[in-house]
Image (tube, rainbow, N blue to C red):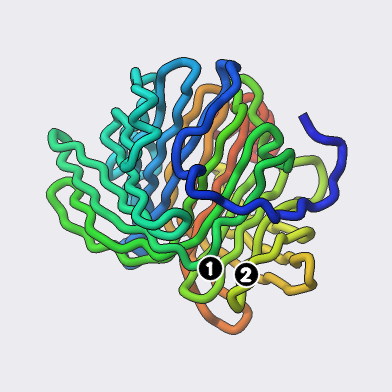
């Protein structure tokens, strides 16, 4: 539930070493904790996620790994896709270092808030992943009541990801700039907001913005800009998007926004590959983007386009005459 205020948060709650591991939770069955890392092979237009979500009050966890490129946008056509939904889980394995999920995903804390070792192996499927995330900005977020994660703490952080990926017998070197997040709190599968979450990152700069999907022009209502070694909350802006006339997914995104000190963000992202990721009552179309800045610099990033199934169906019928329904 919203606090009733749309004032931007202070974002002055530091990420602490204990936040790398499972927290003490209330007894609500929808209490969850998440560990997410993204990565790319830019020259291949390939994107990937490592994701673990614990449900400590159900003694279970979800998540896994997914890797996609232009060869297919459905999970069954992705280079690799494994999203487990209810694996019995020892919660002590999420309080130790490395954090170990039964999905085969592991997160080793090498330096809290800065450096992490990431592994995932599925020998029968021919997947072996060994990566290192090194932060290029502080973890930035909140432990209080802030949109769009009103009932949970949420931290985002850009960094450089290096290492090696073996998929379908092919070895791919990874050296990119990407994003991670860490969250804990209440998250229901029954009520899912529809919003977009997009970001870009390079060695010197990163931004991330949230856009709620409401009637009228799309606005940016939360986010972060990291530039010149300083991270500040983005407090206003607009999102313009171009969508495919048949499938409805994003083909281009343009962000124009400002942080609370007046620094500006202007960037246009062009879609290069995507994965339509199913959820119980919603879907997230994860699109790998090539961002272009006004000075001609380019970098990589991502758009996450989250829609509850019923709202997506109604929008598609109205927008593209029934295609995809």
Classify 1 as above or below 210.
above
Give residue 92's position: percent from left, percent from top.
Answer: 36, 27
Give residue 310's position: percent from left, percent from top.
Answer: 64, 24
Asked whether residue 70 is in view, the answer is: no
Give residue 154's position: percent from left, percent from top.
Answer: 60, 44
Classify 265 as above or below 305.
below
- Left or right position of 315 against 202: right
Secondary structure of residue under mark 2:
strand
User: Which residue: 84% across, 46% down?
Assistant: 6
Quadrant assignment, res 266: bottom right
Q: Earlier in the sequence, mark 2 or mark 1?
A: 2
User: Which residue: 60% across, 17% down?
Assistant: 28
- Left or right position of 321 against 103: right
Classify 286 as above or below 184.
below
Residue topped by disc 2: 267
Classify mark 2: residues with Cα within 10 Å, few (<14), some (14-19) or many (20+): many
Task: Give the distance between the C-alpha atoms of the residues marked 2 and 1, in whole angstroms.
Answer: 6 Å
Give residue 134's position: percent from left, percent from top.
Answer: 39, 63
Quadrant assignment, res 205: bottom right
Quadrant assignment, res 44: bottom left
Asked whether residue 259 is in view, the answer is: yes
Quarter holding the C terminus is: top right
User: Which residue: 72% across, 66% down?
Assistant: 256
Residue 291, labelled with which disc?
1
- Left or right position of 40 against 306: left
Secondary structure of residue under mark 1:
strand
Say if mark 2 contacts mark 1, CB within 8 Å. yes
User: Which residue: 26% across, 35% down?
Assistant: 104
How many numbered badges does the structure rendering display?
2
């Amino acid at each position: 539930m919203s606090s009733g205020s749309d004032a931007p948060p202070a974002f002055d709650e530091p990420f602490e070493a204990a936040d790398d591991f499972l927290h003490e939770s209330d007894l609500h069955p929808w209490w969850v904790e998440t560990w997410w890392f993204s990565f790319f092979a830019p020259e291949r237009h390939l994107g990937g996620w490592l994701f673990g979500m614990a449900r400590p009050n159900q003694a279970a966890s979800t998540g896994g790994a997914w890797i996609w490129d232009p060869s297919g946008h459905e999970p069954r056509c992705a280079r690799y896709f494994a999203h487990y939904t209810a694996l019995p889980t020892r919660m002590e394995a999420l309080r130790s270092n490395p954090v170990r999920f039964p999905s085969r995903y592991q997160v080793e804390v090498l330096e809290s808030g800065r450096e992490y070792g990431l592994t995932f192996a599925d020998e029968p499927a021919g997947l072996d992943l060994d990566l290192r995330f090194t932060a290029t900005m502080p973890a930035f977020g909140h432990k209080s009541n802030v949109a769009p994660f009103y009932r949970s703490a949420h931290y985002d952080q850009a960094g450089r990801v290096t290492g090696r990926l073996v998929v379908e017998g092919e070895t791919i070197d990874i050296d990119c700039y990407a994003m991670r997040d860490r969250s804990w709190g209440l998250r229901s599968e029954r009520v899912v907001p529809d919003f977009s979450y997009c970001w870009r990152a390079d060695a010197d700069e990163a931004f991330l913005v949230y856009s709620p999907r409401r009637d009228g022009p799309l606005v940016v209502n939360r986010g972060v800009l990291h530039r010149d070694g300083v991270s500040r909350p983005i407090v206003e802006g607009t999102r313009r998007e171009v969508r495919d006339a048949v499938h409805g997914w994003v083909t281009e995104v343009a962000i124009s926004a400002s942080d609370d000190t007046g620094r500006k963000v202007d960037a246009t992202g062009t879609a290069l590959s995507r994965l339509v990721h199913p959820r119980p009552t919603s879907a997230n179309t994860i699109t790998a983007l090539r961002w272009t800045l006004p000075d001609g610099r380019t970098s990589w990033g991502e758009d996450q386009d989250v829609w509850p199934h019923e709202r997506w169906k109604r929008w598609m019928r109205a927008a593209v005459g029934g295609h995809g329904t």
